[in-house]
Amino acid sequence: MSHVLVQFILILVTASTSTVAALAAFPALKNLIQSLPVWAQFLIAVFVADMAQALLHRAYHNIPWLWRFHAVHHSSRHMDWLAGSRIHFVEIVLTRSAVLLPLLILGFSTPAVNAYVILVGLQAVLAHANLGIRFGWLEYLLVLPRYHHWHHARQQDYVDVNYAIHLPLVDMLMGTFKLPRDQAQWPEEYGVMKLETVPKGIVSQHLMPFQGGRRYQDHVD
């Protein structure tokens, strides 16, 4: 259900950000960007969007009231392809707006933005999937399962790393890139560090951020 609702919310956010972008776009910059071939626009859009999302993603982890929304996503105790859809609706709107708005304001063409939206859907599924495949050097170019799994690790020294959604380069620039040297090593446990702060159930989890960081007896453990 969450996976379907994510798509509907994405459409709504895209429509609203398009309206704002029509007022805020810089014609000269828009013309310059749209003079590039679509494939070049797409690559630049991926970098711009990933940088915007990584900065917001790090804010989710470091600002307590934002963390309460993001904790819903990190409450998954097992990683699989649907873990990417366990997201609080407020976070969906905030994240999609923060990512799509710069793309539209900068003037990327509709085909380039649409291609990016497709990439988001595919990579969100892939990054969370329970695929124990070793991708070798590709893990330093693209965010793949093992890379993002370590972001979800219930392990203190991985709490503030691997925020990128598409390109590890973004984490390298932010100083938040981290992977074990052993390519066969995966996290032993997933989930939030304080399990008792996230209740079970979709309704309870959507109410949780508004309840002041309380602890729950019926929690995700």
Image (cartoon, rainbow, N blue to C red):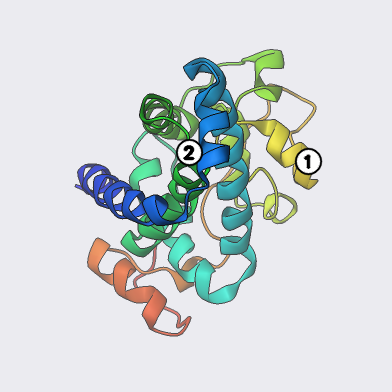
- Front-most of residues 216 and 151: 151
- Front-most of residues 20 and 35: 35
Rendered image: mark on residue 131: none
When asked about the image quadrant of residue 33, the answer is top right
Q: Residue at x 49, y 31 (%)?
A: 127
Q: Position of residue 221 (x, y in %)?
A: 42, 60
Which element carries disc 2, helix, strand or loop?
loop
- Mark 2 / mark 1, whichever is N-terminal: 2
Question: 45 left or right of 113?
Answer: right
Q: Residues within 10 Å of mark 2 (few under 14, many from 20)?
A: many
Q: Residue at x 47, y 18 (%)?
A: 38
Question: 202 left or right of 154?
Answer: left
**For the residues carrying marks 2 and 1, which lies nearer the camera in this image?**
2
Is 105 located above or below residue 185 in the figure?
below
On the question of residue 76 being in view, the answer is: no
On the question of residue 127 being in view, the answer is: yes
Rendered image: mark on residue 107: 2
The amino acid pointed to by label 2 is Gly
Residue to which mark 1 is pinned: 173
- Front-most of residues 115 and 179: 115
Which element carries disc 1, helix, strand or loop?
helix
Q: Residues within 10 Å of mark 1 (few under 14, many from 20)?
A: few
Q: Position of residue 125 (x, y in %)?
A: 39, 31
Q: Position of residue 174 (x, y in %)?
A: 76, 46
Q: Position of residue 53 (x, y in %)?
A: 55, 48
Q: Residue at x 39, y 84 (%)?
A: 211
Q: CA distance from mark 2 to mark 1?
A: 25 Å
The amino acid pointed to by label 1 is Leu
